[in-house]
């Protein structure tokens, strides 16, 4: 199985870590009371802060603005007030997350649209080089959000620190609706991450039959025997994980039954040594001409 990469602890923590302790009202003294108000109080308290001259772009100790806190809270009224009062949509917290990235996790389309209309960058990257599009698949799997981001110019083949694209993530997670959408929108189906792994390999190595079939349909036999940095093909990934249906589908599309990795280990040897359901897989390979 190919382990999921790209889901950062920093991002997950950013969504649940409060800007301040829940009972700490001393933040008003630090000049960050508007952030506290956005996190814990709501629009009426924010109005008081603004009327008192608070800086709407004040940052908490975590580097989070009132706008970020309001968006995470899904407080639409507060988000609108802060935007109308000049809140900066491009500010980032300490993890490099923008308010749009955090709003995408919540999946609140009204807030997402407000932010984009105010100039939020759909292609901004966090400290792990993840974009809002990649984060939307990692966390929310909301096709409406993904369609909107793409319509607003999100780079479909943007890469994170692992070299993964949105399609890499969707294929590996077996999210067929999103895989199909990304393929239809022109995502690079042959993209290789930092380890040389393609979306097809990720689907094969994680036993994701529906996404595998979608990718095979698009490839139509081309590049089916692409190799990763260790010389492994999608067929070898499927065999290694005992993915009988995947092996059958790949062989039906003329995957090389005699493929060998960089160490010289062949598909048949993979089946004999590693496959969990090797009897059925061995039969499939031999029928296809494996030696």
Image (cartoon, helix red, strand yellow):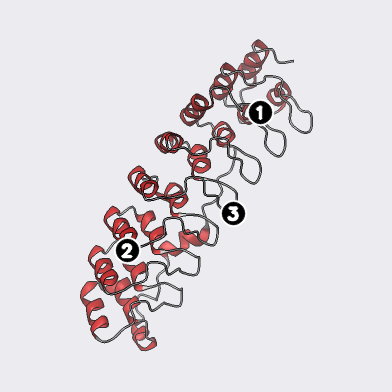
Q: Alpha-carbon neighbours of circle 3 within 10 Å: few (<14), some, or many (≥20)? A: some
Q: Which mark is residue 161?
A: 3
Taking depth in this image into account, of 240 and 72 the one nearest to the observer is 72
| Quarter-of-image position of residue 179 | top left
Callout 1: SS? helix
Q: How many badges with numbers are in the image? A: 3
- Separation of residues labelled 1 and 2 (CA atoms): 48 Å
Instruction: Please determine whether, in this image, residue 173 is positioned above or below residue 69.
Output: above
Residue beneath the point at 24% across and 71% down: 81
Image position, residue 279 (x, y; %): 64, 17
Residue at label 1? 236
Instruction: Please determine whether, in this image, residue 44 is positioned above or below residue 243.
Output: below
Q: Is residue 180 left or right of residue 117?
A: right
Residue beneath the point at 45% across and 64% down: 14
Q: Which mark is residue 118?
A: 2
> What is the quadrant of the C terminus in the image?
top right
Image position, residue 185 (x, y; %): 43, 38
Asked whether the residues under the numbered discs 1 and 2 touch, taking CB atoms below 8 Å apart as contact, a structural biologist would say no
Q: Alpha-carbon neighbours of circle 2 within 10 Å: few (<14), some, or many (≥20)? A: some
Instruction: Please determine whether, in this image, residue 125 is positioned above or below residue 246.
Output: below
| Quarter-of-image position of residue 192 | top right
């Amino acid at each position: 199985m190919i382990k999921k990469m790209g889901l950062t602890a920093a991002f997950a923590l950013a969504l649940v870590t409060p800007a301040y302790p829940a009972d700490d009202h001393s933040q008003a003294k630090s000049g960050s009371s508007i952030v506290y108000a956005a996190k814990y109080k709501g629009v009426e308290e924010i109005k008081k802060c603004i009327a008192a001259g608070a800086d709407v772009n004040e940052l908490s100790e975590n580097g989070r603005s009132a706008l970020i806190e309001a968006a995470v809270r899904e407080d639409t009224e507060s988000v609108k007030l802060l935007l109308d009062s000049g809140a900066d949509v491009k500010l980032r917290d300490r993890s490099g997350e923008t308010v749009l990235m955090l709003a995408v996790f919540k999946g609140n389309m009204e807030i997402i649209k407000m932010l984009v209309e105010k100039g939020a960058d759909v292609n901004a990257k966090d400290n792990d080089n993840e974009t809002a599009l990649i984060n939307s698949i990692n966390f929310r799997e909301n096709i409406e959000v993904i369609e909107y981001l793409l319509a607003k110019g999100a780079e479909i083949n943007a890469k994170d620190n692992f070299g993964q694209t949105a399609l890499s993530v969707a294929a590996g997670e077996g999210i067929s609706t999103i895989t199909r959408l990304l393929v239809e929108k022109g995502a690079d189906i042959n993209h290789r991450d930092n380890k040389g792994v393609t979306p097809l390999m990720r689907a094969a190595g994680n036993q994701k039959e529906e996404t595998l079939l979608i990718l095979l349909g698009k490839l139509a036999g081309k590049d089916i025997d692409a190799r990763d940095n260790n010389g492994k093909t999608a067929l070898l990934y499927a065999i290694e994980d005992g993915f009988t249906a995947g092996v059958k589908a790949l062989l039906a599309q003329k995957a090389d039954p005699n493929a060998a990795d960089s160490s010289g280990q062949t598909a048949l040897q993979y089946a004999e040594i590693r496959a969990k359901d090797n009897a059925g897989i061995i039969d499939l390979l031999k029928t296809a001409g494996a030696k």
